[in-house]
Amino acid sequence: MEIFVILVFVVGYIAIAMEHPIKINKTASALLTGVLCWTLYALSSHEPDKVGSELSHHLSSVSEILFFLMGAMTIVELVDAYQGFRIITDRINTENPKALLWLICFVTFFLSSILDNLTTAIVMVSLIRKLIPNKEMRMFFAGMVIIAANAGGAWTPIGDVTTTMLWIGGQISTVNIMKVLFIPSLLCLLIPLIYLSFTLKGELGHRQNTAHLHTGGHGGERPKGSTAMLILGIGALVFVPIFKTVTHLPPYIGMLLGLGVLWVVSELINPHADEASRKPFTAAGALSRIDSSSVLFFLGILLAVGALESMQILHHFAEFLDRSLGDNRIIITCIGLLSAIVDNVPLVAASMGMYSLTTYPMDHLIWEYLAYCAGTGGSILIIGSAAGVAVMGMEKIDFIWYLKKISLIAMLGYFAGAAAYLAIEHFIIGV
């Protein structure tokens, strides 16, 4: 039966990777894969009660990730409803292409570390569409936004879903991951940025008055309370790691606390307005706009990986890799490169099942390096990360154009950051 479970997982994985050619949403493929893996496991087991208890155990840890993501998505949507991000983006108005490139990339890098790489990429591409009328120039900026968003998301526990998974799973700690991955992640951005600073040619193009640039697509003044919601939203996200450290409660509790505070504040802004006009600016309205299919995608993938872990398939695969490649550094580097082709969520979920916390405790090299590689490796191809796919759709960037113009410099940045991390571990930390 193990062969059939592996076959189902592989077919599901291929369907997820080939989402666009086969025109089947990856969420549907993930859910079917997860359910079928557990069904086959239950049918093959002589102890169905044991399978049920194992499923409940996995669902507990999966739910922590899902509630965390739902809370974070809702907070970001709520801030965006009040056009809070305009407070940041309205101040970007230089007309020097290279200066603007550096400014956009660094804003993306640090914004991604607080929000998440997907949201940040959407916000920044919406901005550059207003700032850069020249289509060819804008595509270079969009490519760099993908690299900056993925690099920025890798070095904090809340910046990328894969890093969040490792953080919630107890593989990495907040302060340590920020300390050891900041320089590698920064280098991952700086190498492509420096290269383009010397090779980028062309003009931004003529644009209209930038006084009312923003990301929400609405004209005029910002809604009442936009500054307060931005401060509260970012404060709620940054507060989560502090809450976890102080209380030792799971991170999703801190995220739900932040969401509760923003929910109350959103209800108190314009309390006399009618229900219809208030709804877009309430947490209830934000909840209706979050990407629910992504949440279900994570549910399906994590359930499928949980089935493979319970059947010891991942443990045996880890032993095979250890015998074949030997060095965990090589294995993790290859996982990062593979994440440029397939989704990094199942890759990280599988890695978490392959390696035990008993053998590799919190903040071990294997977890830190996995957070970097899985987070930044997806930039090498435009389909390798959620940020890349979103930008591809928004700007209609061709896969081949990205491969020719951006992939090589993204790979150079990836290996530069990887080398920096391994050097830091070897010479400074002494692993």
Image (cartoon, helix red, strand yellow):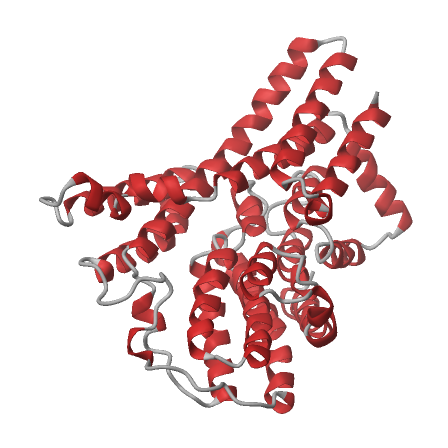
Q: Position of residue 136 (x, y in %)?
A: 59, 79
**Picture quarter with the C terminus:** bottom right
Residue at x 46%, y 57% (from the top left corner): 119
Task: Using the image, determine if residue 252 lies above or below residue 311.
Answer: below
378 or 64: nearer the viewer:
378
Residue at x 13%, y 49% (from the top left corner): 270
269 or 163: nearer the viewer:
269
In this rendering, position of residue 414 left or right of residue 136: right
| Visible residue check, residue 247 | no
11 or 357: nearer the viewer:
11
Q: For residue 418, which quarter of the picture?
A: bottom right
In this rendering, position of residue 188 left or right of residue 224: right
Task: Using the image, determine if residue 232 lies above or below residue 243.
Answer: below
Q: Position of residue 5 (x, y in %)?
A: 79, 27
Q: For residue 31, which quarter of the picture?
A: top right
Task: Using the image, determine if residue 324 lies above or below residue 387.
Answer: above
Residue at x 31%, y 42% (from the top left corner): 285
Q: Position of residue 391 (x, y in %)?
A: 56, 62
Most distant residue in the right direction? 324
Q: Position of residue 217 (x, y in %)?
A: 36, 62
In this rendering, position of residue 306 left or right of residue 115: right
**Picture quarter with the N terminus:** top right
